[in-house]
Image (spheres, helix red, strand yellow):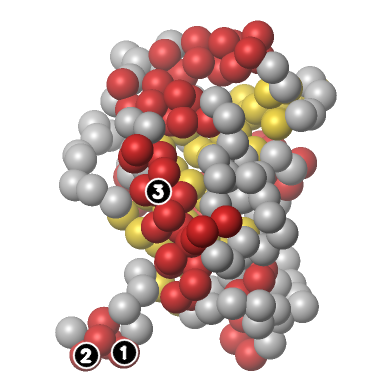
């Protein structure tokens, strides 16, 4: 209890936030819907640090809600180098992330786990680590979530706005990812699909609905 009083945040190490949200129990070997946060769930305002500035991207809440309806765990995996760089701290991240989740809940969309990695080579102190295994494009956050939720990574999906999100999915053993405003591609068993318009959104929603059973 003393440690929790000193550090009220769900940090498993200085630069890794792992937060389980809610108490829903999922069967073993379920696929998950992984999503990046800034630029994917909310509009990226370049190191967002003010909850009042948070605006959800259009059409992202229905994606998360579709996974909720299908009984699929929803996991946010986000790099947060702004913490390592000293732009803000974990308390600011907590406030911003809380606002993101609140806005999603207002639209009937719920997240089951949030992982955030603050490690970056441009940081200072214990956060100044280059190529940390938890920082995308490395797959550490996805693998960590899979261990905690007992997920089937091969059947899981990832949505992001950067190639690093897709690469993290590929390295974690996923087979498909959706890249916002990106182009279709395929590499070593991993397919990237674009997420540009309502037609692409329909493909993603159908893929989510097909994950169960």
Q: Residue 23: percent from the left, percent from the top?
A: 19, 47
Which SS class for mark 2? Answer: helix
Image quarter for residue 87? bottom right
Identify which residue, 30 or 66, lies in the foreground: 66
Q: Residues within 10 Å of mark 3 (few under 14, many from 20)?
A: some
**Pointer 1 residue:** 6
Tell me what residue is drawn at x 23 percent, y 48 percent: 22
Measure how far apart labels 3 and 1 are at the Cα level. Answer: 25 Å
**Pointer 3 residue:** 101
Which SS class for mark 3? Answer: helix
Tell me what residue is drawn at x 55 percent, y 65 percent: 50
Q: Earlier in the sequence, mark 3 or mark 2?
A: 2
Q: Residue 57: percent from the left, percent from the top?
A: 59, 36
Tell me what residue is drawn at x 21 percent, y 90 percent: 2
Task: Indicate whether 143 appears above or below 5.
Answer: above
Image quarter for residue 106? top left
Identify which residue, 118 or 63, lies in the foreground: 63
């Amino acid at each position: 209890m003393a440690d929790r009083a000193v550090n009220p945040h769900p940090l498993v190490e200085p630069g890794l936030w792992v937060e389980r949200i809610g108490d829903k129990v999922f069967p073993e070997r379920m696929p998950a819907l992984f999503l990046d946060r800034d630029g994917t769930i909310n509009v990226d305002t370049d190191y967002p640090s003010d909850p009042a500035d948070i605006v959800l991207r259009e059409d992202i809440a229905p994606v998360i809600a579709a996974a909720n309806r299908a009984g699929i765990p929803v996991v946010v995996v986000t790099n947060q180098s702004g913490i390592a760089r000293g732009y803000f701290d974990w308390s600011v991240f907590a406030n911003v992330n809380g606002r993101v989740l609140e806005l999603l809940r207002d639209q009937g969309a719920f997240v089951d786990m949030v992982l955030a990695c603050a490690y970056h080579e441009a940081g200072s102190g214990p956060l100044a680590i280059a190529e940390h295994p938890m920082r995308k494009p490395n797959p550490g956050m996805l693998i960590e979530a899979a261990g905690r939720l007992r997920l089937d990574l091969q059947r899981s999906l990832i949505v992001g706005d950067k190639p690093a999100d897709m690469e993290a999915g590929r390295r974690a053993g996923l087979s498909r990812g959706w890249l916002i405003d990106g182009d279709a591609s395929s590499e070593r068993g991993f397919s990237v699909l674009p997420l540009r318009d309502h037609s692409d959104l329909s493909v993603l929603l159908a893929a989510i609905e097909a994950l169960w059973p």
